[in-house]
Structure formats: structure tokens, C-alpha cells
Image (cartoon, rainbow, N blue to C red):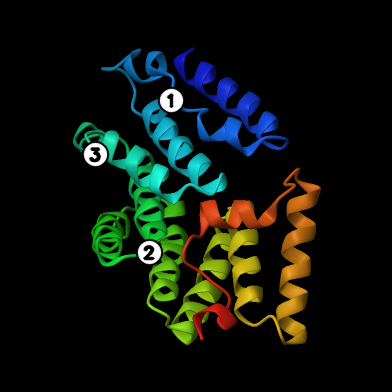
Amino acid sequence: RYTLQTLTRAVARDRASRLDPEVVRTAFDDDELWTSNADGPSPPHALLYTGGIQSRLYAGDPQGAWDYAQRHKTLERRLRFRDRLSRALYFSTRAQAAIARGDSLGLKEAKRAIKKLAPLDVPPAKGLTLLAQAGIAGVRGQADEMSVLLRRALETLQAGEMDMHAAVAQLRLGQATPETQSGQELIGSATAFMRRNGVVDEHRLANAYAPGCASRGDLN
């Protein structure tokens, strides 16, 4: 019941965010959701953490995303002996918030989160690790390394049937080579997939799922 309540509210707010990104920024601040069933199953809290961070990144508020990550960082300790999928959600999303900071502290925290994420033996972990590593390379201005990591992330996410994350990796890879025909094709294919699946702002979604992966022109 608790999980269904969380997901229902998240979906309802996500639909509203298509019209007003400010709505999704505050969609996961409900204290009742965080305090209810505090000793129960961990997935609802991992989902809240993920939604709270990604919604702020989607709304263009990286500082708010990091503040949210810090406000709920005790979740890491609570997830220590819980399922690996919940821990993968926690560490990948914390890495996203840290990368979006775009500074040395953010990169340090992102690398720490990735170190915890990479060994987790669950399908999303490898692809999310590569996507986060690409973001770090982007923040450092390492365009070639970022492109290599994005391509590996795309292949891994597609193999793991993480279709929306794969589409974001594809979009970012195309943005890394926007002047080429292949780059434009990647952007077009990713955008078309997102639109078919209800995404109305692919750039906001890319900022939420793959922060740090700027276009090659911006890096240079």
C-alpha cells in the first residue's frame, strides 16, 4: 500500500510537471511519505530519494538537488543491509546530484557514490555507473572520454532494457558530435523515442538523468 501510494503520487505530479516544472520540483517533499513506515521495506524511500533529486534536476535546480541529497543522506545507512536495487537507486541518484554541482566537491562525492554503485550485482548498476562516469568526464572537459563512456552506457542500458536511460545516453552521445550526420541521427532517434513515450522536454530529462554531459562545443 505504501509503495503504491508513493508511485501514484509521483505519477500524478509527473503529469502536472509537463505543464509546470516547478510542480515536479516539490513533488517529493511530503514529510508524511518519508516518516510513514520508517522501519518497513526500503524501496519506497529509495524511490522518494530518486524522485526528489531528479525532479529538481529536471526543473533546473542543481543546488536544490544537492541540498535534497544531503538532507536525506542518512538513507544510505538505512539501506546498508537492504536489497541491492534500492542501493543502486540511491547511489546512482546521489552521483547525479553531485555531478550537477559541477565543482571539485561534487566530483569527489560522485566518485564515492560510483565506487559504491559499481559492484552491485543488479542489472541497472553497470549502465548507470557508465552514465555517471560520462558525466564526470564531461564536467572535467574530457570530450573524447565522455563520448566513449556514453557509447558504452548506451549499449549497456539497451541490453538491460532500460529504454529511457538508453535514450538519454543516445541523446547525449549525439550532442557530443552534433556537427556530424551520425550525431544528428542519434539526437533525432532519441528525441523521437522520448516523444512517443510522453516526454515533452528531452533536454530537461537529460539534465535529470545524465547531468554533466555537455555538448562537445561547450566542452571545447
What is the distance, in whole Å, between disc 2 and disc 1 at their CAs? 24 Å
Q: Are marks 2 and 1 in contact (CB under 8 Å)?
A: no
Q: Position of residue 112 (x, y in %)?
A: 23, 59
> Residue 102 — which label?
2
Q: Position of residue 204 (x, y in %)?
A: 61, 52
Q: Are marks 1 and 3 in contact (CB under 8 Å)?
A: no
The residue labelled by disc 3 is 76
Residue in view at x 78 percent, y 51 percent: 195
Name the N-terminal-most of marks 2 and 3.
3
Helix, strand or loop at label 3? It is helix
Helix, strand or loop at label 1? It is loop
Query: Callout 2: 10 Å neighbours few (<14), some, many (20+)?
Result: some
Q: Are marks 2 and 3 in contact (CB under 8 Å)?
A: no
Which amino acid is tagged 1? Asp
What is the distance, in whole Å, between disc 2 and disc 3 at their CAs? 22 Å
The residue labelled by disc 1 is 29
Which amino acid is tagged 2? Gly
Horizontal side of 197 relative to 164 (left or right) equals: right
Q: Quadrant of residue 203?
A: bottom right
- Above or below, 73 against 169 in this view is above
Helix, strand or loop at label 2? It is loop
Residue in view at x 45 percent, y 74 percent: 138
| Front of the two marks 1 and 3 | 1
Residue in view at x 55 percent, y 78 percent: 218
Query: Callout 1: 10 Å neighbours few (<14), some, many (20+)?
Result: some
Name the N-terminal-most of marks 1 and 3.
1
Residue 40 can be seen, yes or no: yes
Which amino acid is tagged 3? Glu
